[in-house]
Amino acid sequence: MGVQESSNFPVIRTVGLQGLLVTFADKLSEPSNRAALAFQGALEQRLMTGVIETSTSLASVFVRFDPSELSHDVLREQLQGLLADRDWYAAPLPEGRRFWRVPTVYGTDLAPQLAEAADAAGMTEAQAIDSLGSARVRVLTIGFAASQPYLGTLGEEWDLPRQTELTPMVPQGALVQAIRQFVLFTAPAPTGWRHVGQTGMRLFRPEMEHPFALRAGDELIFEPVARADFLRLREGDPLNGGASVSEIAS
């Protein structure tokens, strides 16, 4: 596989009595995340007997199975066969992904750490808004909290250290910048990263048939809007805060 980062990958590991983990790299990169998303998509299409569910992390795919129907060894052999089928690091991303345009207010009292982040990145606030507000990012994985996405990657100028003190709480819909990524908070929570933007999206929707608004592989752009426009959009659309969504062509 020409673009893989190490000859040690991909690797399959046993996870307890009911799981195998297929890992494509020991760190996040575009190829390793692409491989994880594409491989998981292929597994979902195959509907392998005995496989209960699959999920992705930044660079891995977890496969949970029923050991009464399928042994570790048989599943490992099937996964190895699928791994050998193509170069997953250069595979097309799975179908069904979506592109979201999310109105976002940067700075102001609603996202008070933009100035600190801009200064750390060597930018003015206006330059930071231009940079962050034009970045098209991918849902790399969902984790930490229900429906909470990790989004990236941002340019190297956004590879910033953590804050020296914990922010006691950011609200639902907070756009937080962390290690060349965004994290979009699904619920109020403390964080050691900088709250640079605020959206009106409600990501976890337990009352709906599909409770997670976003899926791994979706893409987003957090478009800057004025504070007054943001408040109007959030009031008029409490579910999405004015966000629009379209299918990404294969």
Image: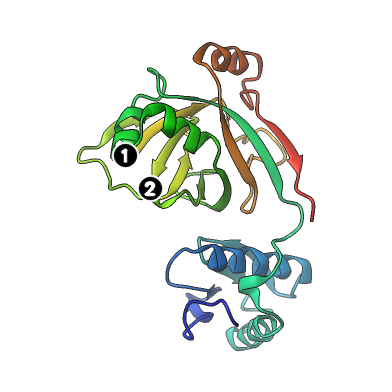
- Position of the N terminus by quadrant: bottom right
Residue denoted by label 1: 122
Q: Position of residue 195 (x, y in %)?
A: 38, 32
Residue 14: percent from left, percent from top: 49, 79
Closer to the camera in the image, 121 or 82: 121
Residue found at the very far left of the displayed protein: 164
Q: Amino acid at mark 1?
A: Gly
Which corner quadrant holds the C terminus?
Answer: bottom right
Answer yes or no: is residue 6 visible: yes
Q: Which numbered circle lies on residue 157?
A: 2
Q: How many marks?
A: 2
Do callouts 2 and 1 mark residues in contact (Cβ within 8 Å)? yes
Disc 2 versus disc 1: distance between alpha carbons? 8 Å
How was this image coloured?
rainbow
Which residue corresponds to the image point at 58% horizontal and 84% vertical from the top-left? 72
The amino acid on which the numbered mark 2 sits, given as a three-letter code, is Glu
131 w.r.t. 93: above or below: above
Q: Where 211 sits versus 83, above or below?
A: above
Which of these two is toward me, 207 or 54? Answer: 54
Q: Around disc 2, counting alpha carbons within 10 Å, would you say few (fewer than 14), some (14 to 19), or many (20 or more)?
A: some
